Image: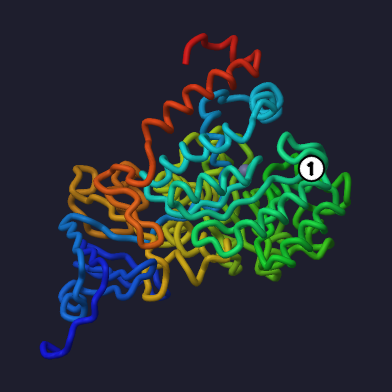
Amino acid sequence: MSKREKEPVALLLEGAWVLTQNRTREVFSPGAVALRGEEIVAVGPPADLKARYQAARTLTYPQGLILPGLINAHTHAAMSLFRGLADDLPLEEWLNSYIFPAERCLNRDHVYWGTKLAVAEMLLSGTTTFCDMYLFADAVAQAVADTGIRAVVGEVLYDFPSPNYGPPAAGLIFSENLCRAWQGHPLVSIAIQPHAVYTCSPDLLQQCGELADKYKTRLIIHLSETPKEVADCQARYGVTPVAHLHRLGLLTARLVADHAVVLTEADQELLAAGGTGVAHCPESNMKLASGLAPVAELLDRGVPVGLGTDGCASNNNLDLFQEMDTAAKLQKVRYLDPTRLPATAALDLATRGGAAILGLGPQVGALTPGRKADLVVLDLNQPHLTPLYDPYSHLVYAAGGADVQTVMVNGRLVVQDRRLLTFDLEETMARARELAQGIRDCSPYVAQRFSKA
Ligand SMILES: [Zn+2]
């Protein structure tokens, strides 16, 4: 070995722990990851990797835990501008009096800067990929490209006119243009995103499905989020939302069902048979009092499940460490059984589960050779993480996004020592404060509540 030439790599990261999240959940302690360009070359004990590779640069974290970058499987990033606008209200009042009036004022500038604000929060708390559904998705995609995070992006489509593309038919054209414009981009992929079964006609849903097939991309929809949605769908179409999509031929592995809270046994079987993914958003479901999704049962049936925060206005943060903690605990409450959704399964949701449902399985979600170098170093040198017996336990039940020290996306350092390297955080926050004034003026209810920013 000593006489053989060492293979050159760009970077070697060493930590106290490496959690690979590969098929066998391999763990190395201490551990190291070797990178070249966008990709992971090798993962293993530091001594082995140092014997095989000559690294141009080495980053050493004696108290660092290296894990795959987290994947936020469902959010509306630019809603970061609406955080704390209105809370603790019935869903209808929350939407009609606060969120919809504010959204009617939105333009491309709001969405661009609101997305950048959300990306700053996500990168600093260890999220390296997010799936976004919103208006002005071209501005979302641009913000992703400008900040260096990875994302699946889609324009929200429905039966009524949009402040972005105008009449409903133009939404499909807008989405198709997005698919064409971003094809082959290393960080941005486009999905087709009809809003929900109660805002989209069967005809629109089928056209969305055809477009997703044509571009071999994901079809993503809010599905069975609340008891009211299910009751209304039963009244209108005579079936549950899941069965409605099944009837339309859309319940396939291409589909991602956001929320999937209110499900019958038959719905769960349909999801499993279709290979349809679910994006579980526990904190949003709790805050809007939508209910408790049967995630443990879905996993038992083999349904792929990822984890999402949903928009900031119904969470109210984008911290996936908190979301994992909540997800794990909520399943224990749902089944009154503390063995449901253990820490390892909660971490799966936020890593390889999210990658699988978004169609990014071969690229991200685990630290294995050939995958993209999307990773996080968590700083274990903290009172709430000392001592450490089980890294999965700490990640899910004790750590928070603020413990993230270093983040890489696609082989590029984007956060180092808790500082963003790829764009100006102060400028982003200043723009968000400016834009908030206009948002306040859009809603008489908000304007009345407090007079200052
Ligand atoms: Zn949502």
Q: Is residue 407 left or right of residue 428?
A: left
For the N terminus, the quadrant is bottom left
Residue type beneath disc 1:
Thr
- Residue 102: horizontal and vertical position, in percent? 64, 25
Quarter of the figure with residue 339: bottom left
Q: Is residue 36 visible?
A: yes
Instruction: Report the label total.
Output: 1
Residue ID at (19%, 79%): 48
Quarter of the figure with residue 269: bottom right
Q: Is residue 246 left or right of residue 345?
A: right
Front in this rendered view, residue 343 or 55? 55
- Residue 124: horizontal and vertical position, in percent? 36, 44
Residue ID at (33%, 60%): 67
| Helix, strand or loop for disc 1 | loop
Label 1 neighbour load within 10 Å: few <14, some 14-19, many 20+: some
- Residue 282: horizontal and vertical position, in percent? 54, 45
Q: Is residue 236 above or below residue 288?
A: below
Residue ID at (77%, 52%): 173
Ligand number 1: quarter of image: top right
